Image (cartoon, rainbow, N blue to C red):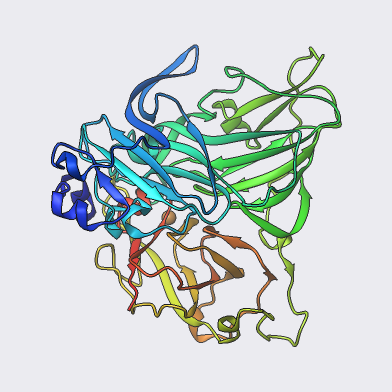
Amino acid sequence: MKTATVFDGPLLSRRDALKLSGFVAASAAIPSWAQDLSAPDYRLEIAPVTLDLSPRHRIRTLAYNGQVPGPLLRLKEGKSVTIEVTNRTEAAEVVHWHGLFLPTAVDGSFEEGTPPIAPNASARYTFTPSPSGFRWYHTHTMAMDDLTRAQYGGQHGFLMIEPQQEPGRYDQEFFLALHDWDGHLLASDDGAMNPSYGLSTINGRILGAGEPLRVREGQRIVLHILNSSPTEVHWVALSGHSLQVIALDGNPVPAVKSVPMLRLAPAERVCAVVDMNNPGIWVLGEVRRHIQAAGMGITVEYANQSDRPQWQQPPGLIWNYEQFGAPAGAGAPGADPPSSDARRADAPIVIPLAFESKFRGHGAMEAWTINGKSYPDTSVAPLQAGQRYRLQFINKSVDDHPLHLHRHSFELHSIGAPLRTAPPSAGPASPPNRRGIIKDVLLVDALTQSEVDFTADHPGATLFHCHQQNHMDLGFMMLFHYA
Ligand SMILES: [Cu+2]
């Protein structure tokens, strides 16, 4: 695959570094006069680490500052920040600030033009964080057949962009990252290979091996949950409690709602408030027993309790995005939602994107196409700045895909329409299910179509891809360009 060449690509030249504002490489190739000698606000070092998932499960991986997840970075919306990243590995690295509206030079994608950080070099990312909310940072490299690299490893961390005005206060907040480890390829019925995992964790620990979340009766806590898994969708519940969803992908939802469990596709985030009103020691964990048994869980411990951790198995898997939206159809049927933004009154330009797999032979992972082409041959017409677009995700494959758009967020328009035999784009436009749900990752189920709207208001190359590492590695990626 051509996509593999990013590892072997040209290293950053001095001229490239200097022409990309915001990103300063401080490697030996840069003379001292070009370096910003003031201290950065934060430092991240990417290096090999030995991680004890439990006393019996030790792995070697790559991590930020020797810990998994990496340090929680609390940044202020609208206040410029400089983060220095040092690469102590043997391959080029890049850090993507997922969910932020950043220039291409610092967004953290080679494909958009962010310069690689060469082995044993440092680089500075200087940017102004926006929008506020629960974001995250992670590597944006390729793994291909090596199920220890890129998102398969430990390079992920929490990013909290604090709003300029302080939001609601909670007694405690906890940041939790779901992750799968020890990947190997497993043949599916059709002979194609897919990653499968031996171990699963929350915050890098197997259930029972890490510190519990310590709470008190009467507290109102907020959980900021990230799925940093390379490829797996996860379902989580907190036994004895319901979860009040207040934000999806860090963006407040129009309709706050209590649910028995959460579903998170790779790269998705959910913020949920929990009223601690059921004293005991409980398990917060994966709802599917075999994944919880592989380690995905953490105990929640009320003060002065000494029982064994309790798990209550919910009856089934329940989730839909639309329940968190505002009711649609307040106006005339099929009318565009009212909006104060004049541009939104214009009908969006529809961009159909059809996704299909391509069998590459027994024992190999499938390749992926967008409108019949694999990256880097994927393309659509250039975007016009200021124009409203509707991305039509037509999933013709039998896999679900967590789709991510860089440097922008989108509003869900219609979700999960079953594919008809006729080309879906030829049919009547489906009505919006619910309004006002803003995300940067959307899970599109197998053989369904979903639509999202966004305004092209951040000019520059914009990467769109499936966040499942093996799909992205094998062609499921496209660059939007602005005219
Ligand atoms: Cu995918």
- Tell me what residue is drawn at x 28 percent, y 57 percent: 111
Q: Nearer the viewer, residue 108 or 359?
A: 108
Q: How far across and how far down the image is residue 149, in percent?
A: 32, 36
Can residue 30 be seen?
yes
Q: How far across and how far down the image is residue 283, in percent?
A: 70, 27
Can residue 261 be seen?
no
Q: Answer with the quarter of the image where residue 334 lies.
A: bottom right
Q: How far across and how far down the image is residue 211, in percent?
A: 62, 19
Compared across the picture, whether 1 is left or right of 193 comes to left
Image quarter in which the N terminus is found:
bottom left
Answer with the quadrant where ligand 1 appears in the image. Answer: bottom left
Identify whether 400 is placed above or below 336: above
Image quarter in which the C terminus is found:
bottom left
Q: Answer with the quarter of the image where residue 238 lies.
A: top right
Q: How far across and how far down the image is residue 215, in percent?
A: 76, 25
- Tell me what residue is drawn at x 50 percent, y 11 percent: 55
Identify whether 169 is placed above or below 334: above
